[in-house]
Image (cartoon, rainbow, N blue to C red):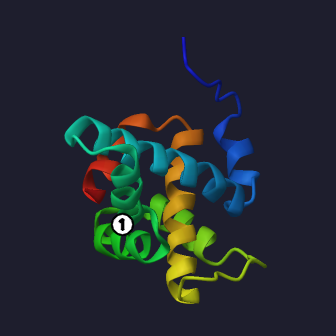
Amino acid sequence: MELIDREKNEMDINMLSPLTWAYVGDAVYELYIRTNLVNNTKLKPHKLHIESIKYVKAKAQADILKRIEPELTDEEKEIVRRARNAENHHLPKNADPADYMYSTAFEGLIGFLYLTKKDERLKEILKMCM
């Protein structure tokens, strides 16, 4: 049994706003980072939080996307483009707007892969991030 039902089909997911993909992708990526840190370190919760921020802040996600972009398929690059160009009325407080756009694109890709149940590809991409 799946922990979370992912009932929508790919066509329905493709019709969602890329910001919705990013909303889900943010949670998926943060859980991946936290789990990875818990499994591979002996840090206490406050230190885990400090360490996780290094991976989940906008600049770090933007840098990751720029690094892995050559490894993405054409379909994935199109997802990234749509998420990067999505009109977002939120202005980042602690991030460069360009980094924030790339961060949103990265989270959009993660969310799209998760929602479309492309779990093997999602795992490959998440491993590229570390």
Q: Quadrant of residue 23?
A: bottom right
For the image, the number of numbered tags is 1
Residue 34 lies left or right of residue 6; in this view the side is left
Residue lying farthest to the right in this orientation: 89
Residue at the spot 55% in from the left edge and 63% down from the top edge: 79
Residue 108 lies left or right of residue 118; in this view the side is right
Closer to the camera in the image, 53 or 99: 53
Task: Locate residue 50, reporting x and y percent.
Answer: 38, 60
Graded by Cα atoms within 10 Å as few (under 14), some (14 to 19) or many (20 or more), the crowding at tag 1 reads few
Closer to the camera in the image, 39 or 112: 39
Residue at the spot 37% in from the left edge and 63% down from the top edge: 55
Name which residue type carries label 1: Lys
Closer to the camera in the image, 97 or 94: 94
Task: Locate residue 108, reporting x and y percent.
Answer: 57, 60
Q: On screen, 102 above or below 109?
A: below
Residue lying farthest to the top in this orientation: 1
Q: Is residue 122 visible?
A: no
Q: Quadrant of residue 7?
A: top right
Residue at the spot 46% in from the left edge and 50% down from the top edge: 29
Task: Locate residue 130, reporting x and y percent.
Answer: 25, 56
> Which residue has dot 1 on it?
54
Q: Secondary structure at mark 1?
A: helix
Residue at the spot 74% in from the left edge and 77% down from the top edge: 90
Q: On screen, 76 above or below 96?
A: above
Task: Locate residue 89, reporting x and y percent.
Answer: 78, 79
Quadrant location of the N terminus in the rendered image: top right
Q: Quadrant of residue 97?
A: bottom right
Q: On screen, 65 above or below 109?
A: below
Q: Is residue 56 visible?
A: yes
